[in-house]
């Protein structure tokens, strides 16, 4: 599997949950996705990682100057692994260095989804 960038892969005893959010997204949409991740964190075993993968124009909300910065930082602090699709970053003219510290990237969301599913991860599309 290609490595994700800018994050340390979570240590687990098994697969986790991958939450995929794609397409146009405003701040309220991202907040809803992050609430779902927080709810999953509270309800699932603590040794199972939660990844939120943002694909599409919503990657702009993961930037360090985003209106959603506080929510992004809170999610990261709670242990949620936030990932941005590099193809989407290019389409949005957003350099990976402008992402909030702690937000990782994957080369292609579609490939990351496939790899995680092949590895037995649960998948939720929001």
Image (cartoon, grey):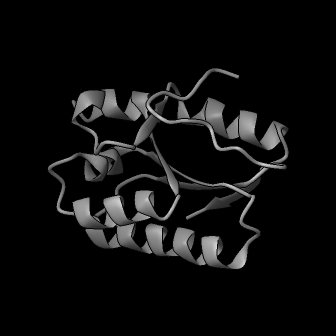
Could you tell me which quadrant the C terminus lies in? bottom right
Q: Is residue 31 above or below residue 123?
A: below
Name the residue located 21 percent from the left edge and 30 percent from the top edge.
Answer: 93
Q: Position of residue 11 (x, y in %)?
A: 70, 44
Name the residue located 73 percent from the left edge and 40 percent from the top edge.
Answer: 116
Could you tell me which quadrant the N terminus lies in? top right
Q: Position of residue 67 (x, y in %)?
A: 17, 62
Name the residue located 70 percent from the left edge and 79 percent from the top edge.
Answer: 43
Q: Is residue 90 left or right of residue 126?
A: left
Q: Quadrant of residue 71?
A: bottom left
Q: Position of residue 51 (x, y in %)?
A: 58, 52
Q: Nearer the viewer, residue 80 or 113?
A: 80
Q: Is residue 16 above or below residue 74?
A: above
Q: Nearer the viewer, residue 37 or 76?
A: 76
Q: Is residue 77 left or right of residue 27?
A: right
Q: Is residue 95 above or below residue 26?
A: above
Q: Is residue 100 left or right of residue 6?
A: left
Total numbered circles: 0
Q: Quadrant of residue 42?
A: bottom right
**Residue located farthest toward the top when viewing the structure as drawn:** 2
Q: Quadrant of residue 74?
A: bottom left
Name the residue located 27 percent from the left edge and 53 percent from the top edge.
Answer: 61
Q: Position of residue 99 (x, y in %)?
A: 28, 40
């Amino acid at each position: 599997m290609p490595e994700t960038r800018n994050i340390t892969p979570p240590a687990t005893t098994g697969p986790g949950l991958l939450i995929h959010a794609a397409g146009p997204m405003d701040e309220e949409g991202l907040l809803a996705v992050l609430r779902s991740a927080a709810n999953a964190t509270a309800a699932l075993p603590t040794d199972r990682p939660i990844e939120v993968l943002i694909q599409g124009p919503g990657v702009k909300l993961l930037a360090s100057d985003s209106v959603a910065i506080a929510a992004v930082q809170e999610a990261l602090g709670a242990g949620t692994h936030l990932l941005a699709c590099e193809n989407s970053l290019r389409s949005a003219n957003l350099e990976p260095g402008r992402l909030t510290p702690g937000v990782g990237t994957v080369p292609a969301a579609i490939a990351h989804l496939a790899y995680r599913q092949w590895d037995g991860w649960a998948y939720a599309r929001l």
